[in-house]
Image (cartoon, rainbow, N blue to C red):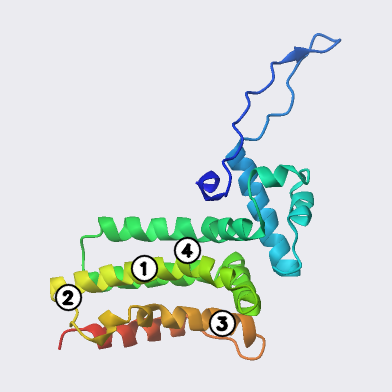
Amino acid sequence: MLADMTAHDAPPARPDPPASTDTDGEITRPKRRRRPTERAAEIVAAGLAHFAEHGYANTRLEDVAQRAGIGKSTIYLYFENKEALFRATVQAHVTPAFSEMTALIDGYEGQIATLLRQVLMHAYSELLRPDNLALLRIIVAEGERFPELRRAFYEAEISHGKALMRRILARGVASGEFADGPAHAFPRLLVAPVFTVAMWRLTFESIESIDMQGWIEGHVTLLMDGLRVR
């Protein structure tokens, strides 16, 4: 998947060199060559670490290449510029979570209220991961100067999240569990408290921490009370 996210096609994988025999008759094998997808994943990991430590503006592809242990020219075989690397970094950390939530929604056959609770719990656990908080911090701090950062995050996360919430709301209305109210026009309302906690973690957590168990329960209760058919 990571190979598909780069601006250039990754170079084809080469077969491992054949084994050789040393002077003592022992068979030795050279180190296995990394596949292009493995190399791309290593570059993405190095990119996120460098973005988080130095910011987007102060990161160069050459710095990421050094951190990933590759030559300066090699990184350009995978990413044509810094924006392409940042987009791949966002997708690498966001796409798996949405794939899991989509699979959950597709296969779910029980009460929609329970499904919504499970999806929200998944959203909390994913967005509050340190790597995703690092991405959010970069977008907030540098998005005004580099609007492409906002666009990358919106396309990878916000737009997909809205689509999933719309699906759940529509199923809830169809099953008779949810009322067809204003929330359906603004599916972001369902996940707004998740982003509130994420922003709190980035700003005021050292001053006042949030009781996550109580917050999530309050979020879900408030949401269900507003959506439930009366």
Q: Which of 121 and 92 is in front in this view?
A: 92
- Amino acid marked by disc 2: Val
Residues at marks 3 and 2, CA–CA distance in whole angstroms: 31 Å
Q: Nearer the viewer, residue 93 or 152?
A: 152
> Residue under circle 4?
156
Q: Which of marks 4 and 2 is nearer the N terminus?
A: 4
Front label number (2 vs 1): 2
Residue 173's disc is: 2
- Amino acid marked by disc 1: Val
Residues at marks 4 and 1, CA–CA distance in whole angstroms: 17 Å
> Residue under circle 3?
199
Q: Is mark 1 on a helix, strand or loop?
A: helix
Residues at marks 2 and 1, CA–CA distance in whole angstroms: 17 Å
Q: Which of marks 3 and 4 is nearer the N terminus?
A: 4
Residue 177 drawn at (x, y percent): 17, 77
Q: Do the residues labelled 3 and 1 touch (CB within 8 Å)?
A: no
Q: Earlier in the sequence, mark 3 or mark 1?
A: 1
Quadrant location, the C terminus? bottom left
Front label number (3 vs 1): 3
Residues at marks 4 and 2, CA–CA distance in whole angstroms: 27 Å
Q: Earlier in the sequence, mark 4 or mark 1?
A: 1
- Amino acid marked by disc 3: Met
The structure residue drawn at horizontal position 33% and vertical position 78%, both measured from the top left corner, is 187
- Amino acid marked by disc 4: Ala
Front label number (3 vs 4): 4
- Name which quarter of the figure residue 102 lies in: bottom left
The structure residue drawn at horizontal position 26% and vertical position 55%, both measured from the top left corner, is 107
